[in-house]
Amino acid sequence: MRIALFGPPGAGKGTQASILAETYGLKTISTGNLIREAMREGSELGEEARSYVTAGKLVPGELVRKLADSAVANAGFNDFILDGYPRTIEQAQWLDAFLRAYKAELHGVVFLAVPDEVIIERLSKRRVHRLTGESYHLDFLPPPADVSPEDIIQRADDQPEAIASRLRGYRRETKPLENHFRVTGLLREVDGNASVDVVHNRIIRFLKSSPVTAARKAG
Ligand code: ADP
Ligand code: ADP
């Protein structure tokens, strides 16, 4: 099964991707996590990306394309869930061409729809594990007791100004993708403004319907 999660920052893509990955044995490919990993390692790519990420701006396409393509190839072109990629029409066209070349087209795209005020609340209370990138929320999903508090941090781009910039960027560059996926017939909108479990069940309902299940059965 090859699926992508799409939606505004803070919609719950990472949270749902990690549950789905476990449920279906998929590999999660999060360009955000890959970029932060590159930044932590201090690689050339990471250093190039840093100023964009911190300001809440999209990292220029070619850098992200390389990261995403090699992660998809490492997954063996199957059984993966894309989280946060593609995020522009250009990225979607690259991905389409790349996957088509390997006969590995996406089976479905889940659009997690969440209103702005909920996004702002979620992002300002988001905390992440500095090594695993796992997301928590101060009220809804506090870090478990066995996780050391020093490992729990707030992302620099979860500060109010960066959140506002990411929402503007989303509307300008990412939202147009909704129509791109709609015309390909891949998109299924899921109301993401509910508890983590309820949203998960809504996504599962979509995945159990064709064409994703058919693709799964066919291997
Ligand atoms: P969120 O979904 O909360 O915005 P991510 O962890 O997915 O967070 O992304 C964090 C940052 O990483 C983005 O604001 C952007 O700077 C960069 N990034 C992640 N994915 C992409 C992408 N597909 N294209 C460009 N930049 C990206
Ligand atoms: P994204 O990857 O789309 O940026 P995350 O999965 O990191 O979003 O979620 C953003 C924040 O909202 C995190 O703090 C997460 O714990 C929290 N969160 C995710 N899903 C829900 C939900 N259904 N209800 C409440 N909080 C949620």
Image (tube, rainbow, N blue to C red):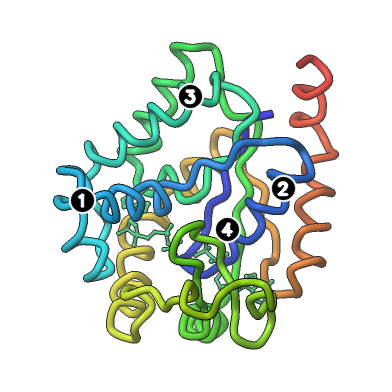
CA distance for labels 4 and 2: 10 Å
Reading the chain from its start, which is encountered first: label 3 or label 2? 2
Between 190 and 200, which is closer to the camera in this rendering? 200
- List the residue tagged with mark 1: 42
Q: Does label 4 point to a residue whose CB lies under 8 Å from ligand 2?
A: yes
**Label of residue 183 in the image:** none
CA distance for labels 3 and 1: 22 Å
**Label of residue 13 in the image:** 4
State if disc 2 and disc 3 touch (CB < 8 Å): no
Q: Does label 1 point to a residue whose CB lies under 8 Å from ligand 1?
A: no
Residue for point 56% across, 75% down = 148
Crowd rating for badge 4 (residues with CA inside 10 Å; few <14, some 14–19, many 20+): many
CA distance for labels 1 and 4: 26 Å
Residue for point 57% across, 82% down = 118
Q: What secondary structure is found at the residue carrying circle 4?
A: helix
- List the residue tagged with mark 2: 20
**Label of residue 74 in the image:** 3
Residue 77, image quadrant: top right
Question: As displayed, is residue 60 above or below residue 117?
Answer: above
Reading the chain from its start, which is encountered first: label 1 or label 2? 2
State if disc 4 and disc 3 touch (CB < 8 Å): no
